[in-house]
């Protein structure tokens, strides 16, 4: 405790009080210092402390009486204190300092310490099955000699378990130790440490800690899980699908992952990272939106591979090469099918706008919205969309002689059939037809038959013929549960009955008629509760529908109110009896870590506000999911159960569910108990084996098999090639096989001198396969190991192959071993390319290294080129003993970037015609910021991009290509920034036109971006934003530093308008 005089300046707090030594000023942390009564005791009452401290300085006084100036970044008044942001000066080593902030003879000091940098693992993570090799780089252990390359000198632990030291190396700043990661049952962040301990006490003991992370195999779920053979995933013709990744690293750009549908590379349109709440904490998820490619009918695997994007992971001031994550891969599948013809919609108009367009932007020729029913009183014109249709029109836009179209409405045929649109990309034809005259109301079958070269393509569609002067509505909705439905009120307009309610009850009848099989049900009771000259209100108690056939959880009926004296005068409305949702089955996903449960109808999601499975499953089911489970609704009829930490559920089990009703909460609660099934598409475990290709006579042998599974795996090890006949085996083979076969885990270890291998200077074939909990067994891998009688020099490059792009740092490590039987011998390394013609002067500067690591920074290699890297290693004591290894670096092109101005928020365009002249201005659709990230120059000619524009309009029922104000297709020039003239589009108010630009380049995957344009019914001001002397970046954003002054101004062509910023 300290006493101070009134008004005396004092230090309230400062943070951080220490930070590791860094190498670049930009990485120095900012110290936040809170001062009281500084620079005067009165400034806090006038909020002028920051102004009085405008000329303040900060000086750091170090232990050795050397001083250095720091930097004051900012000073602000805050609740009576002065908050000062200070950047410390750079230093070369750990040291303590006392910093002093002073102005006008007033000073306040605070302590600060530069600490030794920690150690860092490259990559930062690994599968918890162990076996992979990572590099531990440490500043703190720089004094360790390179000759100390054995477990007696350097040891490492990860998650408290010993990590085997493979090799060590050093550059100017770091000691780098390659270690083999041990297996662990822990997932997520774990501690790691590396230690140097000289048993002779000749060199000081030292140690450093590092952060590491274990991960389980990622999972992928794809919805929709089906697509047509031309890639359509929805009835509206969309070719998009969403892939949800769980337990996957954060994805910042499409360059971070590769996506393949079978053998086809596919671009990623959008990426959304999110965090899902689970019972054990949080879990990272990523949603990828993709365009589905065409494929033949069948099931195609969909593979997402993480490319190892950099991640700062909460640390500072460490070179980028230490922020590499291990490769992760998730696999799901997509079922392709051949679609059947169908009618997607029938829209009726009294009159058309043009010959080719009966309705545009939700309006018919008479200004009324098109309707889905056919009126009894008028023929009008019907527009029919026929999906999955064959090509009909010839090159002249006419129906050829070998093709005909017949449209039948119930018993009558339509006339004047015209093909007004044909979209061969969507396999959709749109017909205009005049319906026949109808004599009565009711539901009829609309049938369209296309006959082409003797082959018929037919589809049917139910349409109601309505008495358009009568209307029936249900207060609260025309729906009821299957049993014990409550009484509801039906309001009927223009039915000719008495205005006296009691009399009106006797004049009407009420019936429920099944729409599928014509089942007739009578209400339990009904009565007119109010009546006037135009409207009657009927209280109706619906019948029970226990034995009714349901489809998608619903039994479809027509509720009819009719006159008792003349039943042909009636009015009907759809009525739905809702059944409790029934689960169709619970299917393991291909990874076995999740269950996907499909329901026969939309549900109310169990009214869940979290992911607790106990809300919708009984205790036994929840227990079978393991200690950690999450229930996530992917859609209203699809539930995904994510399982971890000891699940026991198996195919054949049943899962009792509860607490779920239909989406409108009309049905009773479900008592469904779905059966658990194996994955629809079996996924056999993948298996990788790593270990030494050769061992010395005195060495031990460790071989690791790596396979990913959410549950325990059984490994089958053999000491022989199973394909070899028994009579070809030697006694040494049989002895070795017997010793190896007892191992059932992922690690095969034989102690020093490998006594199980009776003979040396020969190859032993070790076979391994793995079986998962579903009984699926991997292929058997044969791993040959040569046991030498005398030592040999071994070389392995890690990674053995690398796929990357120009934006990434490349690191290749040479792992060498000579002999474990004697003293460690230093190695000499030489790096080159097998094709000298690919070596540029800049690349040569990085190949000219004798270190164990080949480091190549970003933007040195050329996109689209495969580089074969060669490393020659030799003994420093005997250069005649060498070995050579190669690896391939494939530099893929980066994805094109499609950027359209306004794509994030949409554009509101007020441009229309008042009858004689046009109001408003042109609309520019600007995609000029799109770019090829592999091309440094932003010059359009150098970028070499081409642009293709399309426009769509979705009125809620049909998604059609856009048309202009007179019904012609909107066609934009294929340039970066096309323009639309005022009045060229009809006003759409709240429904936008969607303009999509497809950005392409020869030999590259295309990219697309979409902007929504809301066309207003009146002219609107044109506004623009100006950012002064700042420049927009290539991605359309503006980058500033924290101390920048940014002035944003606006211009408007209408000075009478008001501005609002957001």
Image (cartoon, helix red, strand yellow):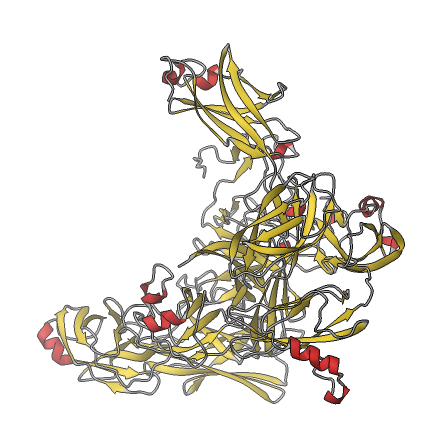
Furthest residue toward top: 105
Percent x, y for residue 183? 58, 61
In the picture, which quadrant includes the C terminus?
top left
Q: Residue 1033 falls in which quadrant of the image?
A: top right
Q: Is residue 503 left or right of residue 854?
A: left
Percent x, y for residue 376? 34, 77
Q: Residue 584 falls in which quadrant of the image?
A: bottom left
Question: Compared to 440, does 194 lie above or below?
Answer: above
Residue 1030: tell me if it is visible: yes
Residue at figure coordinates x 46%, y 19% from the top left: 50
Furthest residue toward front: 200
Residue at figure coordinates x 33%, y 69% from the top left: 616
Q: Is residue 358 left or right of residue 61?
A: left
Question: Compared to 788, does 521 lie above or below?
Answer: below
Number of marks in picture: 0
Percent x, y for residue 421? 56, 70
């Amino acid at each position: 405790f300290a006493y101070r005089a009134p008004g005396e300046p004092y230090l309230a707090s400062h943070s951080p009080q220490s930070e590791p030594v860094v190498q670049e000023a930009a990485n120095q942390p900012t110290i936040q210092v809170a001062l009281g009564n500084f620079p005067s005791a009165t400034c806090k009452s006038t909020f002028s402390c920051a102004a009085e401290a405008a000329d303040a300085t900060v000086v750091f006084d170090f232990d050795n009486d050397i001083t250095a100036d720091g930097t004051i970044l900012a000073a602000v008044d805050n609740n009576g204190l002065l908050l000062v942001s200070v950047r410390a000066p750079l230093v070369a080593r750990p040291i303590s300092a006392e910093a002093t902030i002073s102005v006008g003879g007033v000073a306040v000091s605070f302590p600060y310490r530069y600490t030794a940098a920690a150690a860092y693992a490259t990559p930062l993570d690994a599968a918890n099955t162990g076996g992979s090799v990572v590099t531990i780089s440490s500043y703190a252990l720089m004094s360790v000699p390179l000759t100390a390359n054995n477990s007696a000198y350097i040891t490492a632990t990860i998650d408290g378990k010993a990590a085997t030291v493979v090799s060590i190396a050093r550059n100017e700043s770091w000691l780098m130790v390659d270690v083999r990661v041990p297996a662990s049952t822990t997932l997520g962040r774990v501690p790691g440490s590396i230690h140097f301990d000289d048993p002779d006490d000749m060199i000081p003991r030292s140690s450093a800690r590092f952060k590491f992370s274990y991960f389980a195999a990622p999972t992928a779920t794809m919805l929709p899980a089906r697509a047509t053979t031309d890639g359509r995933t929805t009835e509206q013709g969309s070719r998009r699908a969403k892939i949800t990744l769980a337990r996957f690293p954060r994805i910042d750009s499409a360059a971070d992952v590769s996506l393949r549908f079978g053998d086809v590379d596919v671009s990623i349109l959008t990426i959304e990272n999110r965090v899902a709440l689970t019972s054990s904490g949080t879990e990272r998820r990523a949603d990828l939106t993709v365009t589905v490619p065409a494929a033949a009918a069948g099931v195609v695997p969909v593979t997402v591979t993480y490319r190892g994007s950099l991640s700062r992971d909460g640390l500072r001031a460490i070179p980028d090469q230490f922020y590499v994550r291990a490769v992760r891969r998730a696999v799901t599948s997509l079922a392709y099918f051949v679609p059947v013809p169908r009618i997607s919609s029938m829209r009726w108009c009294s009159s058309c706008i043009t010959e080719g367009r009966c309705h545009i932007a939700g309006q018919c020729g008479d200004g009324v919205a098109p309707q889905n029913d056919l009126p009894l009183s008028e023929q009008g014109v019907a527009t029919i969309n026929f999906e999955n249709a064959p090509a009909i029109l010839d090159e002249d836009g006419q129906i050829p002689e070998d093709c005909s179209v017949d449209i039948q409405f119930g018993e009558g045929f339509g006339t004047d059939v015209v093909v007004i649109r044909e979209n061969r990309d969507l396999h959709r034809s749109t017909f205009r037809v005049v319906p026949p005259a109808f004599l009565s109301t009711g539901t009829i079958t609309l049938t369209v038959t296309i006959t082409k070269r003797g082959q018929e393509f037919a589809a049917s569609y139910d349409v109601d013929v309505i008495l358009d002067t009568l209307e029936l509505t249900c207060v609260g909705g025309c729906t009821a549960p299957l049993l014990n439905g409550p009484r509801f009120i039906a309001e009927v307009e223009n039915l000719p009955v008495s205005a006296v309610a009691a009399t009106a009850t006797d004049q009407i009848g009420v019936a429920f008629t099944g729409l599928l099989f014509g089942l007739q049900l009578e209400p339990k009771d009904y009565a007119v509760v109010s009546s006037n000259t135009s409207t009657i209100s009927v209280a109706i108690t619906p019948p029970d529908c226990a034995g009714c056939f349901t489809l998608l959880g619903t039994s479809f009926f027509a509720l009819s109110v009719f006159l008792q004296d003349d039943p042909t005068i009636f009015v009907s409305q759809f009525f739905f009896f809702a059944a409790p949702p029934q689960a169709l089955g619970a299917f393991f996903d291909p990874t076995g870590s999740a269950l996907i449960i499909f329901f026969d109808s939309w549900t109310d999601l169990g009214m869940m506000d979290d992911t607790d499975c106990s809300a919708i499953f009984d205790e036994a089911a929840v227990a079978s999911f393991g200690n950690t489970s999450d229930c996530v609704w992917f859609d209203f009829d699809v539930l995904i159960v994510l399982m971890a930490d000891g699940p026991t559920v198996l195919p054949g089990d049943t899962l009792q569910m509860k607490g779920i009703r239909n989406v409108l909460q009309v049905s009773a609660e479900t008592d469904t108990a779905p059966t658990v099934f194996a994955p629809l598409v079996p996924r056999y475990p993948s298996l990788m084996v790593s270990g030494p290709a050769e061992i010395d006579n005195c060495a031990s042998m460790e071989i690791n098999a790596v396979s990913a599974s959410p549950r325990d795996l059984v490994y089958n090890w053999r000491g022989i090639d199973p394909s070899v006949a028994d009579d070809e085996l030697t006694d040494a083979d049989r002895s070795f096989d017997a010793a190896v076969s007892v191992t059932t885990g992922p690690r095969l270890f034989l102690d020093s001198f490998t006594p199980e291998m009776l003979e040396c200077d020969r190859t032993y074939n070790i076979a391994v396969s793995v079986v998962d909990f579903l009984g699926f067994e991997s292929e058997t891998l044969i791993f040959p190991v040569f046991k030498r009688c005398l030592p040999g020099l071994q070389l392995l490059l890690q990674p053995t192959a690398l796929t990357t792009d120009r934006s990434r740092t490349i690191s290749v490590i040479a792992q060498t071993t000579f002999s474990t039987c004697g003293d460690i011998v230093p190695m000499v390394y030489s790096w080159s390319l097998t094709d000298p013609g690919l070596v540029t002067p800049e690349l040569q500067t990085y190949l000219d290294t004798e270190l164990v690591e080949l480091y190549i920074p970003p933007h040195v290699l050329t996109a689209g080129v495969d580089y074969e890297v060669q490393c020659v290693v030799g003994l420093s004591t005997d250069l005649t003993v060498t070995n050579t290894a190669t690896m391939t670096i494939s530099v893929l092109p980066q994805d094109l970037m499609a950027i359209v101005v306004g794509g994030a928020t949409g554009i509101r365009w007020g441009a229309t015609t008042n009858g004689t002249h046009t109001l408003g201005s042109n609309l520019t659709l600007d995609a000029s910021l799109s770019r090829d990230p592999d091309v440094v120059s932003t010059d359009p000619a150098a970028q070499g991009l081409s642009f293709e524009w399309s426009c769509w309009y979705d009125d809620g029922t049909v998604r059609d290509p856009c048309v202009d104000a007179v019904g012609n297709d909107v066609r934009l020039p294929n340039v970066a920034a096309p323009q639309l003239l005022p009045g060229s589009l009809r006003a759409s108010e709240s429904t936008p036109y969607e303009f999509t630009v497809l950005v392409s380049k020869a030999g590259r995957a295309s990219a697309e971006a979409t902007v929504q344009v809301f066309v207003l019914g009146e002219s609107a001001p044109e506004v623009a934003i100006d950012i002064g002397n700042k420049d927009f970046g290539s991605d359309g954003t503006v980058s500033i530093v924290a101390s920048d002054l940014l002035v944003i101004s606006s211009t408007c062509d209408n000075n009478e308008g008001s501005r609002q910023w957001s």
